[in-house]
Image (cartoon, rainbow, N blue to C red):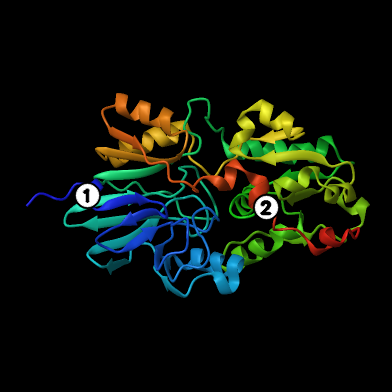
Amino acid sequence: MPAPRPESWIQVTNRGFYVTPGGFYVDPTRPVDYAVVTHGHADHARPDHGHVLATPETLAIMRHRYQERAGGTHDPMRYGEARKIGEVTVRFVPAGHVLGSAQAVLEYKGSRVVVSGDYKRRSDPTCPPFEPVPCDAFVTEATFGLPVFRHPDAAGEVRRLIDARAQFPERAILVGSYALGKAQRLISLIREAGYDRPIYLHGALMGLCELYQELGIDLGPLERATGQNKKTLAGEIVLAPPAALNDRWARRLPEPLPTMASGWMRVRQRARQRGVELPLVISDHADWDELTQTLHDVGAPQVWVTHGSEEALCHWASQQGFDARALAVVGWGEEESDPEEATAQETEPSEQTGQAG
């Protein structure tokens, strides 16, 4: 008997990606009884599910962020292990996106579908690298799914950041970076470049950085920026959520040099709109070359594009002979496309009360 076609056992519903013979969702956008979660970003790991299957690191991140709303029960599954859910076998392989991120490999009666979540192919000291898995259908993001998005080497971008300290010794180098994944990766890249001074953090980044260290990622000496003498921070690197770049919190820093680490910094207009003086093109998402190379590497006849620039990637894939379609899963892809939303709830108590730090 031939293997069933992937579209016969997987549906896109108003709660997201549903695996019918397993009775579970992958990265559901609303609370469900059984969720398989690829990674800890808020647009993929939602609160209030009945049961959650994820890597131990992703579950730790969910507990840190949601506490009692992290899910009724948790089932940690490491890379390479497998679970049978209903009639479907599930296993995780690394996605290279953030700590604990995984691709969900789903197998049913000889048919294999890989839901990659978000991913990248670049080196990241904080998580194992992406592993391509041959499959019948590959579910891919397309956050940077346009040929204009080609990310440079991250080490070169970090060198520009460190060099800015020597160029502006009287200013604090204030770097906007997302709280989960980007901040920790950036710190690790700075350490790889040989920088061993304390790195100062906005309070919204402190908790997740401490969690990374508890989970075995060495980030070196970190200090809370709030409460430091203003002169102490001259010439120092300070990381904060992107929303803090233009916030009154930044006024406590000596002549802050607005810097931003994001794939969107490839677009100069975006940098200008945010008042960024030093744009760093560093992303935790695959760029155009990585996306297209990945489709060749996994060799899936069917390519399903979930969020980002779906039309452009589908057009390219169709020209290459893939059966490509846009699934348009509502709710995925919000983490990096709207950083203010991603960080608005992660403010320090002193900001809420208006106290100076």
Disc 1 marks a residue whose amino acid type is: Ser
In the rendered view, would you say 155 is above or below 351?
above
| Tag of residue 38 | none
- Quadrant housing residue 105: bottom left
311 on left or right of 114: right
In the rendered view, would you say 38 is above or below 134?
below
Image coords of residue 79 (percent x, y):
38, 62
Q: Is residue 324 visible?
A: yes
Q: Which residue is mark 1?
A: 8
232 on left or right of 210: right
Mark 1 crowd level (few <14, some 14–19, many ≥20, 10 Å Cα): few
Direction left: furthest residue? 1
In the rendered view, would you say 195 is above or below 289?
below
3 on left or right of 177: left
Image coords of residue 138 (percent x, y):
32, 44
Q: Earlier in the sequence, mark 2 or mark 1?
A: 1
Label tally: 2
Q: Residue shown at 36%/26% (left/top)? A: 316
Disc 2 marks a residue whose amino acid type is: Thr
Check disc 1 and report its element: helix, strand or loop.
helix
Direction front: furthest residue? 14
Image coords of residue 68 (percent x, y):
57, 74
Q: Residue shown at 22%/49% (left/top)? A: 8
Q: Which residue is mark 2?
A: 343
Q: Verify CB contact (< 8 Å) between mark 2 and mark 1.
A: no
